[in-house]
Amino acid sequence: MSTTPFFALMALPLTMVVIAGEIDLSFPSVMALGTAAYAYTLAYTGDLTLAFFACALAGILAGVTNGGIVAGLGIPSLVATIGTQFFWRGVVLVGTGGNGVSLVPTRGTVFYSMMVGRLEGLIPAQMLWTVFMAIVVAFLLNRHRFGAHVYLIGDNIESARLMGVNVRQRKMLLFMLMGIAAAFAGLVASLEVTYFWPTLGDGYLLTTIASVFLGGTSVFGGTGTILGTFVACFIIGAINAGIVAIGLTGFWTQLIYGLIIVLSVTLQTALSRKLA
């Protein structure tokens, strides 16, 4: 329960992005960008609150950039976010000189306990944050007009425009939410080990995307549930733990996650064609 939330926090909002017919592949780099902003702000100011807001601001900046390129310029999100993934990673590597930053000063604070502490000494705080994220995203998707617009955009974007949906605004908000979630996930992952590495996020691309598609979200948009992604995250986490437990090398994780993505997308496509 302590490591699954690191990618679950991103898989949940990514589900909404995919339902809207888009994709965001820049989140691994945004994890590093947000945490770098936190680490260096904390190092120079010693202010945890200011450092946290710097992290959130970095996530918003990344989200606005993605949203502006995709929704504003009409560039396909696959191409745009691959580009921004390399761009933000480059920003972090150049800015840090490839050096890590210790987050030990955060340990022992109330903020640290809120982020990665243990409730009753057992339940990781990041697990509670994941549940909170799931509730918020599920509410937006299923109980708010915003969610109805997301489904409509993914199902038929032209119909959405004819019905008066502000497609650009909705997509911009989706990418902003994804940026904030990625920055937050990166911060939580780094606080768990009280250290920031500029390569943070490199290992989360496959697990996050696999969770979304294993949870039943259609690669073509218009279909998907938060509950499905939430459950899939823990299935992926269990698979990862099982690989380690039986003594297989890390190479097997990429093979298995890749297989999960291919099979999930293939089955969804076959079923949708059969039902059509």
Image (tube, grey):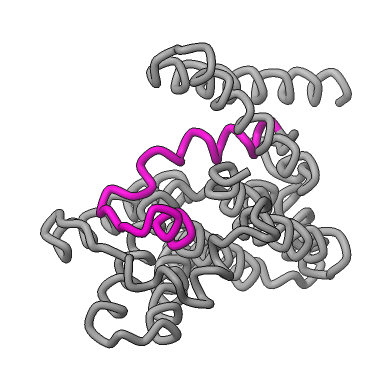
State the residue at coordinates (25%, 54%): 198
**Residue 57 sits inside the magenta stretch:** no
User: Quick check: 230 left or right of 47?
Assistant: right
- Magenta segment, principal secondary structure? helix
State the residue at coordinates (39%, 21%): 250
Residue 190 percent location from the top left of the image = 39, 57
Q: Nearer the viewer, residue 107 or 188?
A: 107
State the residue at coordinates (33%, 73%): 105
User: Quick check: 67 left or right of 38?
Assistant: right
For the C terminus, which image quadrant?
A: top right
**How many numbered discs?**
0
**Residue 196 sits inside the magenta stretch:** yes
Q: Tell me if I can see residue 21 in this picture.
A: no
For the N terminus, which image quadrant?
A: top right
Rendering quarter of residue 54: bottom left
State the residue at coordinates (40%, 86%): 50
Residue 26 percent location from the top left of the image = 41, 51
Furthest-front residue in view? Answer: 121
Q: Nearer the viewer, residue 94 or 77?
A: 94
Residue 132 percent location from the top left of the image = 72, 63
Q: Nearer the viewer, residue 230 or 110?
A: 110
User: Quick check: 80 left or right of 237?
Assistant: left
Q: Tell me if I can see residue 171 in this picture.
A: yes
Q: Nearer the viewer, residue 260 or 73?
A: 260
- Magenta range: 187-214
Residue 168 percent location from the top left of the image = 59, 69
In the rendered view, tell whether residue 171 sits above or below residue 5.
Answer: below
